[in-house]
């Protein structure tokens, strides 16, 4: 979908309803070895810092209580129900995203230094640790990443 440019005469974005406004780190333009990455190969961020929250009113007229507040670091799903709407304020060059609250999976204490135990699931999300994948067969044959069976339980 790309980034929508908000014209210079607008200086702020306010989320409505059950949306949150979040700021995320920019994707890297270059790989570790210094190779330029096209848009299709850049890793998309899924950690963001909450800038503002909507009113809590949902499409069906009910309301929700947000479990997040300004400054919280959240993990959001990449394949949510509405997708992430990325916006750029032309006036400031700031990139932000409107994210539906139901697409927020959890909260972390910060975006840089955290452990798995620091993750606090939100709403109906749960955290499951997958079983370890065997790197070799019982006969000792090494399995490459493509040949390893993906864990189905945790």
Image (cartoon, rainbow, N blue to C red):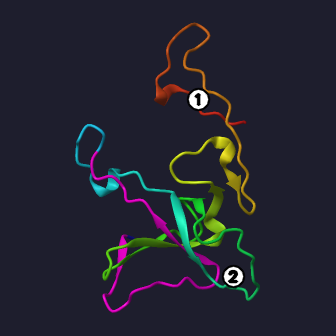
Which quadrant: the C terminus? top right
Is residue 139 placed above or below 9 in the rendered structure?
above
Residue 11 included in the magenta stretch of the image: yes
Q: Nearer the viewer, residue 116 or 2?
A: 116
According to the picture, the residue beneath numbered tag 2 turns out to be 56
Residue 60: % across, % down? 72, 86
Mark before the other along the chain sequence, 1 or 2: 2
Q: Quadrant of residue 90?
A: bottom left
Secondary-structure class at tag 2: loop
View extreme (top): residue = 139
Residue 112: % across, % down? 50, 49
Q: Nearer the viewer, residue 143 or 128?
A: 128
Residue 36: % across, % down? 23, 48
- Residue at 60 percent across and 21 percent down: it is 134
View extreme (left): residue = 35
Q: Nearer the viewer, residue 37 or 135?
A: 37
Look at the image and give the residue range highlighted in magenta. Answer: 2-30
Q: Seen in the image, is 96 located left or right of residue 51?
A: left
Residue 76 included in the magenta stretch of the image: no
Q: Give the overall secondary structure of the magenta segment.
A: loop
Q: Quadrant of residue 32?
A: top left
Which quadrant: the N terminus? bottom left
Residue 11, numbered label: none
- Residue at 54 percent across and 27 percent down: it is 148
- Residue at 30 percent across and 88 percent down: it is 8
User: Mark 1 touching mark 2, by CB under 8 A?
Assistant: no
According to the picture, the residue beneath numbered tag 1 turns out to be 149
Q: Nearer the viewer, residue 38 or 107?
A: 107
Secondary-structure class at tag 1: loop
Q: Residues within 10 Å of mark 1 (few under 14, many from 20)?
A: few
Residue 18: % across, % down? 64, 79
Q: CA distance from mark 1 to mark 2?
A: 42 Å
């Amino acid at each position: 979908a790309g980034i929508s440019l908000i014209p210079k005469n607008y200086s702020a974005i306010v989320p409505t309803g059950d949306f949150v406004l979040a700021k995320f780190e920019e994707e890297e333009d270059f790989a570790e070895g210094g190779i330029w990455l096209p848009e299709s190969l850049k890793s998309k961020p899924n950690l963001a810092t909450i800038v503002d929250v909507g009113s809590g009113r949902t499409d069906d007229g009910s309301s929700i209580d947000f479990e997040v507040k300004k400054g919280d670091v959240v993990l959001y799903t990449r394949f949510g129900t509405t997708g992430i709407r990325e916006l750029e304020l032309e006036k400031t060059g700031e990139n932000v995203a409107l994210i539906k609250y139901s697409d927020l999976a959890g909260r972390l204490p910060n975006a840089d230094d955290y452990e798995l135990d620091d993750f606090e699931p939100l709403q109906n999300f749960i955290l499951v640790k997958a079983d370890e994948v065997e790197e070799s067969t019982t006969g000792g044959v090494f399995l490459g990443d493509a040949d390893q069976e993906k864990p189905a339980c945790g």
